[in-house]
Image (cartoon, helix red, strand yellow):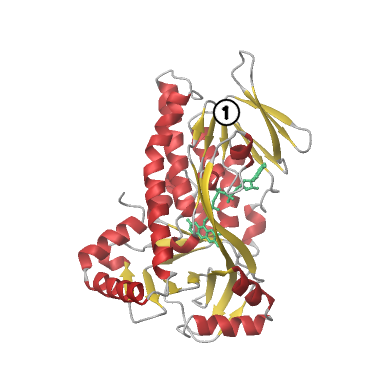
Amino acid sequence: MVGLCLALALAEQGFEVVVLDAQPPPAGLAQLQTTLAEPAFDSRVSALTPASQAWLQQLGVWEALAALRVCPYSDMQVWDADGTGAIHFTAEQVHAPCLGHIVENRLLCAVLYQALRQLPQVSLHNGHTLKQIEQSIDDSNSTRVLCDNGASFRCRLLIGADGGNSVVRTLCGFTTREWSYQQQAIVCTITTASPHQFTAWQRFTTAGPLAVLPLLLPGAPSQHCCSIVWSCDNDQAAALMALPAADFAAELQRAFESRLGPMALLTARVAVPLQQQHATTYTKPGVALVGDAAHTLHPLAGQGVNLGLADARCLAEVLAQARQRGEDIAALQTLSRYQRARTGPNLAMMLSMEAFKRAFGSDSLMLRWLRNAGLKVANRNLALKRTLIQQAMGLSP
Ligand SMILES: Cc1cc2nc3c(=O)[nH]c(=O)nc-3n(C[C@H](O)[C@H](O)[C@H](O)COP(=O)(O)OP(=O)(O)OC[C@H]3O[C@@H](n4cnc5c(N)ncnc54)[C@H](O)[C@@H]3O)c2cc1C
């Protein structure tokens, strides 16, 4: 998602872009249209902030995405399983039409591919897995990348947008600070007996947060499909994954305190290992990292792709400006402007997610009292709530 957005932004500014993606291309829009009335949702979804939406609008892909299938959410309900602390955010509190949208990752990729295919300055190479990088030692100032299928490409600037296990990051010798949570996130799509009320729900337990996110079928009044992200320790995740679907749904309903009534599974469950990592630098001469390749964080705040899109937007602006000024786009001096602009916001988000994770992951009586009291105080303070909402919407630093 992040790499495709960046490719589009750069190509729209006239850069020549080569996209290598290990994955096959997603189905075309015409083919996707025929399946959208069915509740065959992608189990990987993202909560996109209004800031990300605004950039996708600027890139000219939001309308196509919205015409496929997105679900706005106007409310967020967050509560602590071990107490009575809760906080309720609404779009009304910040006079906005919604707090964000839940989008299916594969649909976002599909509209981005559709837009990229229209641009002659872009060449797309799917099923190409990068496995080797040679930075020039001659005076061509270029980087050569080799793929597992024997194909090779030369570029002036190599951008690693290849996710949390970035091969570009490893091969170019970037170091990371990382810690594994020994946790997995179980994701799948479910139906709920009661309507989701266009609300993103999050229940915090000491084992990890359980998020229930609203989905919408186009043309149907139904508000009964949701995506879940259930983060829990490895042992608990393995036990939950081993349960038959009906038993898992019963466990889920219990963990969610039956707030939306009985639940049933619509898709198979997928367990994703969770880790947090941050590259100590995002740039070297001729190379830059964006998105999860630069930083991977716990999904509890649903911010990973939003931070990645902000990286991509920033890097595209830095490169366009450098070209206008006649500067070298691959020089460390140029790329450092991107790094300086993005490290602070990314690090701040990662630290606050870690603090949240630790506060809610503790059994300590004192911490339980504090977090419950904190949630109650925050829930009564409209000014504080507005600040928190604006941060979550990507509208303030
Ligand atoms: C359970 C869960 C829920 C989440 N929910 C949210 C949410 O609600 N909101 C949010 O903002 N974020 C969310 N996130 C985080 C979000 O999914 C990631 O931040 C996002 O996917 C990162 O996008 P990316 O494009 O940087 O990397 P990726 O999505 O990992 O994409 C990397 C791409 O690189 C390609 N690739 C990898 N290696 C190679 C190679 N060697 N050669 C060629 N191509 C390669 C892959 O095929 C892939 O296409 C969630 C994460 C998890 C685990």
- Indicate the amino acid at tag 1: Glu
Horizontal arrangement in the rendering, residue 82 relative to residue 369 (left or right): right
Q: How far across and down, in percent of the image, does residue 209 sit?
A: 47, 70
* Residue at image mark 1: 16
Q: Residue at x 50, y 33 (%)?
A: 283
In this rendering, would 101 be left or right of 381?
Answer: right
Q: Is residue 213 above or below residue 339?
A: below
Residue 325: image quadrant is top left
Residue 317 vs 35, above or below: the answer is above
Mark 1 vs ligand 1: CB below 8 Å:
no
Residue 162 figure quarter:
top right
Q: Secondary structure at mark 1?
A: loop
Residue drawn at point x = 24 percent, y = 72 percent: 377
In the rendered image, the residue lying farthest to the top is 139
Q: Is residue 185 visible?
A: yes
Residue, x 63% and y 66% (percent of image)? 271
Q: Position of residue 134 (x, y in %)?
A: 67, 26
Q: Residue 15: x percent and y percent?
A: 53, 28
Indicate whether 367 appears above or below 109.
below
- Whether residue 356 sits left or right of residue 284 in the image: it is left
Q: How many marks?
A: 1
Instruction: Give the answer, above or below, for where 210 lies relative to 27.
Output: below
Which residue does the image show at 52% across and 50% down from the upper left? 178
Q: Nearer the viewer, residue 291 or 84?
A: 84
Tell me if I can see residue 39 in this picture.
no
**Mark 1 Cα within 10 Å, few/some/many (few <14, many 20+)?**
some
The picture places residue 190, in percent across and down from the top left corner, at 58, 76
Q: Is residue 268 shown left or right of residue 212? A: right
